[in-house]
Amino acid sequence: MGAQCDDTFGLFQAFIRQGQTFFSSARHLEHRASPLFFYYAFLNLAKAYIALRKPDLFGSPLKHGLSHRYKAQDDFNSQVVAVAERGVFPELYELLTEEQLPKSCSFRVVDLLGYLSDISFEYQVAGFGTPFLLPVRSKLFVSQKSETVSEVWPVFAVAPHEKLVGRSYALTALLNAFEEVSLGKTECERIFNLKASVRLQYRFFQSKNIYHIDADRNEFPKLREDSRAALKLLFMPNVFADEEDFHFALPTSDKPTLKLDEFIAGYLIFFYLGSLVRYRPDYLERILRSREAWIIRRFTTSCATTLLRHASTFLLGQNRVFHSR
């Protein structure tokens, strides 16, 4: 047991140090080269996370678990990253989400860009569509029924509501346990610190169940389990210190039950760009001369630190909040 722990720690330490080295080096490179080093940084952090849980996987070489097929006639909108049945990425995805990816699964790069909070404005301006991330504020309502018993239920404020238009498929699990409610101007400002000028941008959801909490707090575990089940597909931690408690990361319409979030999407995009840096620099140059060039540059220069913060939350097993961008 001791020798196995030493071996696992050695693996973990090596992957963390490799990841740190690649990340530090990538920050000094231009956007034509840095995606490859950023990808290797996150690849090694992913391996570190896997090594703590499945160290035996590294008894033999573990491939990336991803591929990108280049076709000269394809434009940027048709670019996809395909997932293999075995490799680092499918193992990481299963550990993070507790779900296996379906066979022959692939993701459009344009869709993945919609999960990056640092470039959400640019994503819309570029005409790619509506981003998939929605900030959420949460509160626990308490109604005191006696000296020893209270009624408790969670309530969420989600905005902007325009991002939910045409995406009702994403709320199926949530609406099994929560219902949409209306809150007046006074309640919005008092409870969620929302001014009248922004109140209409929000939609509000409260638990269908009311939990009775006594001195033994027996129903607290049920409240937690019910909320986690309802939010499992959508929940994404907020790694910045602002008024939003977390985010909803909506699934895409073609994969309505498949969880995606900022880290998973960013990891896949860095794989894609890193593949172009390594194998198809001519196509990368073509992209950098197109209208997509500025959003690729913004992604490369702005998103890596946010992804690193997400990586630290799952590596440490804690939802840590950092200073603003």
Image (cartoon, rainbow, N blue to C red):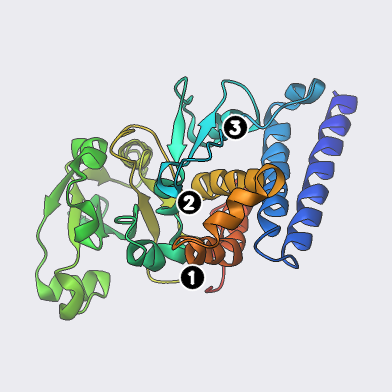
Q: Nearer the viewer, mark 1 or mark 3?
A: 3
Residue 73: % across, % down = 47, 40
Q: Amino acid at mark 3?
A: Leu
Q: Amino acid at mark 2?
A: Glu
**Residue that protrudes farthest toward the front in the picture:** 73
**Residue that protrudes farthest toward the right in the picture:** 3
Residue ID for mark 1: 241
Mark 3 neighbour class, 10 Å CA radius: few under 14, some 14 to 19, many 20 or more: some
307 or 8, which lies in front?
Answer: 307
Residue ID for mark 3: 66
Residue displayed at 48% across by 24% down: 100
Earlier in the chain: of badge 2 and badge 3, it is 3
Residue ID for mark 2: 262
Residue displayed at 38% across by 39% down: 232
Earlier in the chain: of badge 2 and badge 1, it is 1
Residue 9: % across, % down = 83, 37
- Give the alpha-carbon distance from disc 2 to disc 3, as whole Å: 18 Å
Mark 2 neighbour class, 10 Å CA radius: few under 14, some 14 to 19, many 20 or more: many
Q: Amino acid at mark 1?
A: Ala
Q: Which mark is residue 34?
A: none
Q: Quadrant of the N terminus?
A: top right
Q: Is residue 43 left or right of residue 8?
A: left
- Which image quarter: residue 140? bottom left
Element at badge 1?
loop
Q: Is residue 199 visible?
A: yes
Q: Nearer the viewer, mark 2 or mark 1?
A: 2
Q: Is residue 315 visible?
A: no
Residue displayed at 24% across by 50% down: 153
Q: Quadrant of the C terminus?
A: bottom right
304 or 207, which lies in front?
Answer: 304
- Which image quarter: residue 133? bottom left
- Above or below, 320 against 235 in this view is below
